Structures are given as C-alpha cells and as structure tokens.
Image (cartoon, coloured by chain):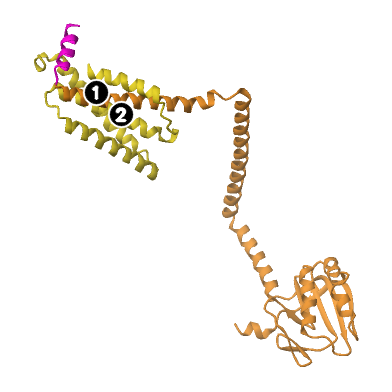
Amino acid sequence: MLPLIGLLVGIALGIVLNIPIPFVYSKYLGIAVLAALDSAIGGLRASLEMKFNDKLFFTGFFSNTLLAAFIVFLGDRLGIDLYLAAVVAFGVRLFQNLALVRRHYFQKRHWE
Amino acid sequence: MKYFRSFVIALNNQGKRTQIAIAAVTMLLGILIVTQLRVHQSATQALQNATESDLIQIVSKLDSEINTLRVEAADLRLQLFKIEQASSSSAEVMSESSKNLNNLKIIAGLTAVHGPGIRVLVTDEDITLNAYDLVDVVTELRVGGAEAISINGVRVTAGTGISQTDDAVYVDQKQVTPPFEVLAIGNSEVMHDALVLPGGIRDKLGSLSGVSLYITKEADIKISTAVAKRMSNK
C-alpha cells in the first residue's frame, strides 16, 4: 500500500508546490517521468521476485535518470532527437517489466 | 478480485525497506507527472488564452510572411530559369564576355576608341601650370564619366602617371608642352558641367595668368591606343 500512498502524496505535493519549469526543459522532465515510472515498475517486479535490493534500486533510478538527461542534452547539442533513444529504452523496459508483473500476478506460487 | 486481494497482501508482506524505497520513487513520480502536465498545459494554453484579435494578428502576420516568402521563391525560380537558359546558350555567354573584354580593353587603353565627347584646350603662355593641374582636369573628366582620355595625343589610363621635372610636364614619361589639348570620350553634357561648375576647375585654372580653357563639345573624337611601349613591355 505504501507505494500507492507515496504516489498520491507526490501528486498532492506537485499540485501544492507548483514548481515552475520553463517549457524548454519539459523534454527533460518527460524523460525523468519515464525514468521514475521505469524504476517504480522495475522495483515492483523485483519485489515480486523476492530479489529486491534497495541499493540497486536507488542507484539504478538516479543513474538512469542522469544518463537519460545527458542523452537529451547531447541530442539537443548535436541537433539529433537523441532523447528518442532514452524514450525507447525506457518504454521497452516498462512493457517488459509490466509483462513480468502480470506473469507473477497469475503465477500464484511466487507470492503465496 | 480474490487474486487482487492476495496480490496486495503479498505486496504488503514485503519488507518495510522495500516498500519505503518504492514509495519514495512513486512519490517523486507523482511530483514529476503533475509538474510535467502543468508545463505542457501552460504551453498549449498560450495560444488558447490569446484573444481573438491577437489570433487574427498572428494569422495575418504569418500570412504576409508566407506571401513574401512565396514572392521570394518565385523570384529565385525565375533567376534559376534565366541562369539555366543562359548557360544552355553558350553563344550568349561568349558575346557577353567579349563585351566585357571590350570594356576592359577600353579602360586599359588597349584599343583605339572614338565617339562623342569634349575637347578641352588649355593655353598656358607663362608656363604657370604644373602636373597637378593636369591631374585635376583629368580627375574632373573622370568624375564626369569619361571613358577614355588623352592629353596631347597620349592616352591616359588607370596606370598613367603625370609627373613634372622643373618646368616640363610628362605624361607617361612623354613630355607634353602647352597648349594642352585634352580629349575625353563620354557624355559631353555631364563632362562639360563637371568642368564649368562654379568654383570648379575652369574658374580655378582660368584665374591664373596666361591660362585659359576652351571647352568644345565634339560629335566624334578619336583617341588612339595607349603608348606602344607599354604593350611591348608585356
């Protein structure tokens, strides 16, 4: 239940804080959203597989986000839509992790 | 539903650390999503919030921009067409370049030329004029659009030097003696006006003792090529 509560708290915080971000950086923000979503679902999957490691989880989250931001920055500088690489990578992982979570959901023996 | 409940229970049975970690990230996720949605909305609302007159202005501005760009494109297309045509007919190019060559030859004094122009006769009984006065006359004629100039039969081109040693005046190392006959081909009206301008060269030289300028417009003036010596020097 805690993750769901965390999400709700985050949404509430976002509404309350109303962080002003220039439109130019909305690309970075979008990538950050993807990275966070990827990490959340990846963590869910790892916890279902009983091999969750919080150190791995946090370092993965931050390094992925930083790398993605760097790729977006590089793409902006080079004039290539390099951020698509990050979008595709995160997207593929999202779907994979979701598929695995689904599998674990139906394979009761994993969590019963 | 049964599945779901046990699934949630299973998730809740995870270690506290696991739950807190994932919760932290999902909280961040929530903040990010809300912020991103807001940024995106405000960006799209920039046009939505514009008043009707603003929108009309924007549209008309873009329209006029499109029009000017269209005109430019048509112009460039026409230019391209012309260039293509010109390059296809090499005879045209040849005639164009030979015309250019002719003009350059006239400027360089390589060909004898004739045509309408003016004759300036400068008398100098007391030998008061020097080379600079002749240079002034030539300059005035050039300003008047002279295409070819000669002094006492010596062609004056861009590379001609007018110099002086003692009382003798030299044009391209050839001594010239008064009276000086300066011939110039070009628009005789303009050249005439350039010389007789109030306070101009005629007034200036005419005030010197023994000096007078006689300016006549001629229908056909002949000017020979530049000194043969220069051509043989090549």
Q: Is residue B89 visible?
A: yes
Q: Amino acid at mark 2?
A: Leu
Residue position marked by numbered label 1 in the rendering = B23
Quadrant of the image occupied by residue B105? bottom right
* B151 w.r.t. B175: above or below: above
Q: Main secondary structure of the magenta part?
A: helix
Residue in view at x 30 percent, y 35 percent:
A86
Chain A on-screen colour: yellow
Relative depth, front residue between A42 and B116:
A42
In the picture, measured across the screen, residue B63 lies left or right of residue A78, that is right
Residue in view at x 66 percent, y 70 percent:
B104
Q: Position of residue A71 (x, y in %)?
A: 32, 40
Relative depth, front residue between B155 and B111:
B155
In the picture, measured across the screen, residue B10 lies left or right of residue B165, that is left
* B209 w.r.t. A43: above or below: below
> Share a chain, discs 1 and 2?
no
Residue position marked by numbered label 2 in the rendering = A34
Q: Position of residue A73 (x, y in %)?
A: 36, 41
Query: Callout 2: residue from which chain?
Result: A
In the picture, measured across the screen, residue B62 lies left or right of residue B155, that is left
Residue numbers of the magenta segment: B1-14
Q: Nearer the viewer, mark 1 or mark 2?
A: 1
Quadrant of the image containing the C terminus of chain B: bottom right
Q: Position of residue B126 (x, y in %)?
A: 88, 90
Identify the chain drawn in orange.
Answer: B
Quadrant of the image occupied by residue A57? top left
Relative depth, front residue between B223 and B119:
B119
Residue in view at x 19 percent, y 17 percent:
A102
Q: Position of residue B196 (x, y in %)?
A: 88, 71
